[in-house]
Amino acid sequence: MPPNSIQAVPRYAGASTFARLPRIDEVDRADVAVLGVPFDSGTSYRPGARFGPEAVRAASKLLRPFHIGLEVEPWVTMQIADAGDVGVTPFDIAEAIAGIEQAARSLSARADRIVAIGGDHTIALPMLRAAHAQHGPVALVHFDAHFDTWDSLFGAPMVHGTPFRRAVEEGLLDVGGSAHVGIRSTTPSARDFTDDEELGFATFTTLDIARRGVDAIIDRVRTRVGDRPVYVSIDIDVLDPAHAPGTGTPEPGGLSTRELQLILYGLADLHVIGADVVEVAPAYDHAQITALAAAGVTFDLLAMMAKGAR
């Protein structure tokens, strides 16, 4: 029986790594590394996502090895390790982004793929820069209540509402294969939709999912991505606040946790080369609802990587 088995050590005990997995320094090399990025200086409403990695890791102790939806055991078929947290400054956004990118690039020498736990959505930009260094332009499947393609917020060009505009401008994305899923909420102007469309993204709103069904959206995303290398970015606020209250910019009318899971399962054979789960702000959470959802979604991403391993 493995020393950290749920039959040997109660799940509320054991290592404080994600799902009590080994640390990166305990393995020779990892197929996937889970990296905490505790940064939230780019948030525009409720701060606190810097404590997200800690909360998600704590909630992940509840996870069991077998993924029922995809019928895989991610840490049996792959070597997965916890790479700890990036030591990132909270005072200078540009310096923080550079530090996150450097940490991800360095980690790529020891792990084939990285799943980052944020932190606010600003962290997607440096993670995409690191992914681009390995794979060239990647398709993006972005789950979020918001586009995050604004040009700036209060004159700041690199915050949690802008990472994917910067990514397009820098040539990091294969925009023809990229899509937003779960968009909703109020927005300053209808022009936001036009601007985003001009960047090249496809958009599938929560109303599209409600009216057409999960399977139809899966088919459309799969067709758009094709066989491109794809980066999956999940803002936990894609879920309705009933399912994820602990986040910085909650928006009613979101997906249920089950809907998000079903979409991810339907995309499992895509060539996922990296991912992030962001915007968990535990100070606004209740009974770990949001942290548990984020831990489960991170497990789903790892299962997708195991299922679609190439």
Image: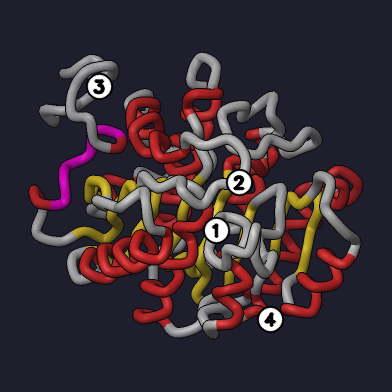
Check disc 4 and report its element: helix, strand or loop.
helix
From what the image shows, is residue 66 above or below residue 230? Answer: above
Amino acid type, label 4 = Gly
N-term mark: 2 or 3: 3
Tell whether label 3 touches label 4 (CB within 8 Å).
Answer: no
For the point 64% across and 27% down, the residue is 243
Residue 21, magenta (yes or no): yes
Determine the image quadrant of residue 202: bottom right
Q: Nearer the viewer, mark 3 or mark 1?
A: 1
Gap in angstroms between the C-alphas marked 1 and 4: 24 Å
SS state under label 2: loop
Assign the C terminus to one quadrant of the image: bottom left
Q: Residue flagged by tag 3: what amino acid is it?
A: Ile
Q: Secondary structure at mark 3?
A: loop
Res. 44 mark: 2
Q: Amino acid at mark 2?
A: Ser
Q: What's under tag 1, amino acid-wise?
A: Val
Which residue bears the numbered disc 1?
Answer: 159
The stretch of residues the image draws in magenta is 19-24
Q: Residue at x 50, y 66 (%)?
A: 231
What separation in Å lies between label 2 and label 4 (alpha carbons)? 29 Å
Q: Using residue 18 as the reference point, say whether residue 256 is left or right of it.
A: right
Residue 199 drawn at (x, y percent): 73, 78
Asked if the residue at tag 1 contacts the one at tag 2, i.e. Cβ–Cβ closer than 8 Å, the answer is yes
| In front: label 2 or label 3 | 2
Residue visible at 65% across and 58% down?
A: 154
The residue tagged 3 is: 6
